[in-house]
Image: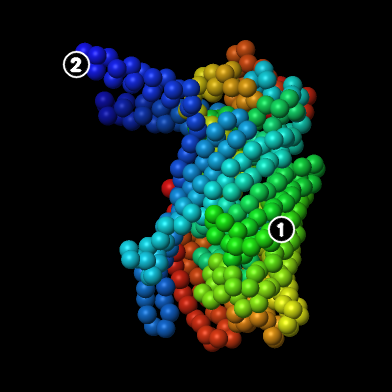
Amino acid sequence: MFKFLLVFICLLILCGFTGELFAQNTQIKGFIDGITTYQKGQVSFGFEEQDLFITSQITDRISFLGETVFKFSPSSPTDFDVSIERVVFKYNYAGNHSLLFGKQHTPIDYWNDTYHHGRVFYPTIYRPLLFDANIIPLHTTGVRLQGDNLGDIKFGYDFMVGNGLGSTDVQDNDKFKSVTVAIHIKPADGLQIGTYFYSDVISKGAIPHGFTLPVKYQVNQNLLTGSIAYFGKRYELLAESTFAYNHTDSIGTKQTNASYIYGGIRVTDKLVPYAKVERINYQVGEMYYVKDNVTSFIAGIRYEISYLAVIKLEYEYDKKEIEGQINKVTAQFAIGF
Amino acid sequence: MKAFLFKIVFINLIVFTAYLSVKAQDMPLTIIANSKGAPSELTLGQLRAVLKGEKLRWDDGNKVTIALMKTNTPIGMNTCKRLYNMTSNELNKLFLALVFQGKGEAPTFFNSVSELQTFINQTPGSIGIIESNTTNNERVINVDGKKSI
């Protein structure tokens, strides 16, 4: 009995000691939002994704970021799915230059890499429609070189090679790799101007994220995005435009353009009225995307209780080629915790 | 009479506390740093960039670690206003966004100046802000040639 106690105490001491040795700065944070919508004479209550993200400084130069989302999924037996959204190992090899590996938000435009699941950061309730139209690849698993805040104009770059569209999180579905190149500058406080390029070959038979049916033809895809973001003390502006070029051998190259412009004015410390106009236009004969030309307009008001709690009220009008006209009023309470 | 005296003392205490708080927010600030990492001289622009998490490493290779007083303390509020040109809320949002994007680390926040000073002394690459009249033997970083700002 004594021997057992001695071993137990020694183990406890050892655990405590090793705990000291490997003390890490690990933090868990999260986001969630509740929404109420009014559409076609019906009021609905609900909540969206519950997002948890973990950051941990492993050594002086190595860090980890993980992000997991729990979301409603009618096809799941429990009505909810768990999704690994990001697993990023980062090695800061020199100055402001880092090497990243893992599943990441594709650095394809400002919104995707800046807000993504962090709804408390969103200037509007929902993300732009081009995200749900599967026009841009939201995540890429691969290796990325990143630099930020270099020189007087605060130049930044991302160069990423990853599994292409149609791949799973653990394996590429074909021999082709996606390539993303992004550059930006921050010439003044709150201002960021960037341009982004993405290229991939989507194999015949692949089922990219968000698609329900396999792609019928091999598609060579190139995406080009330009963006300007300004979030100052009083004025907010975010404008992005993406040109997508999908090439198939049978019909040649078709162009899709998705653009939006958001503007807001901070009238008090906490209150920001805003508006957003968005348009997605597909060229006739587009084979890869579901052709559904959209014009959308929203007007809303945002009340920032604190940096961790935001209320938004928004009116949205969409005119869609397939669904027709949509009128919707949405209220959202988004928090960080 | 007792109640009247109590009221007078109570009001004076409130006024005195408010005075101390306002005074603390006007106090000059001094930038202190560990012996390893930060250079002995910075411009105000360079300092602001460092404090906003825009610099990951010092020229000697040490990782930049920012130490601040909590944003609800008078020194913390003074720091937000004068060095970040932000409210406490804006500063917290800035760092939450930076951490979420995986582009940086949040500062380490302290309740007391002595804790912050100890942290600076023990952490290579650290840089922190305290009031000028509370410096002990820490390494002081000149900003635009001045010991306090």
Q: Residue furthest front?
A: A175
Q: Position of residue B54 (x, y in %)?
A: 68, 40
Q: How far apart are labels 2 and 1 at the CA level?
A: 63 Å
The subunit carrying tag 2 is A
The subunit carrying tag 1 is A
Task: Tell me if B108 is positioned left or right of A164 in this view.
Answer: left
Please report the residue visible at 62 percent of the width from the left and 12 percent of the height from the top: B137
Image position of B27 with respect to A230: above or below? above
Residue type at the position of mark 2: Met
- Is the image coloured rainbow, by chain, by secondary structure, or in one colour? rainbow
Q: Residues within 10 Å of mark 1 (few under 14, many from 20)?
A: many
Residue type at the position of mark 1: Val
Q: Residues within 10 Å of mark 2 (few under 14, many from 20)?
A: few
* The C terminus of chain B - image quarter: top right
Closer to the camera, A268 or A253?
A: A253
Residue receiving disc 2: A1
Q: Position of residue B96 (x, y in %)?
A: 54, 45
Q: Which mark is residue A179?
A: 1
Task: Tell me if A158 is positioned left or right of B133 in this view.
Answer: right
Q: Is residue B25 visible?
A: no
Please report the residue visible at 65 percent of the width from the left and 55 percent of the height from the top: A162
Residue A150: image quadrant is: top right
Closer to the camera, A16 or A141?
A: A141
What is the count of numbered marks? 2
Q: Is residue B43 visible?
A: yes
Please report the residue visible at 57 percent of the width from the left and 30 percent of the height from the top: A59
Closer to the camera, A254 or A169?
A: A169
Image position of A170 with respect to A318: above or below? above
- Mark 2 and mark 1 on one chain: yes
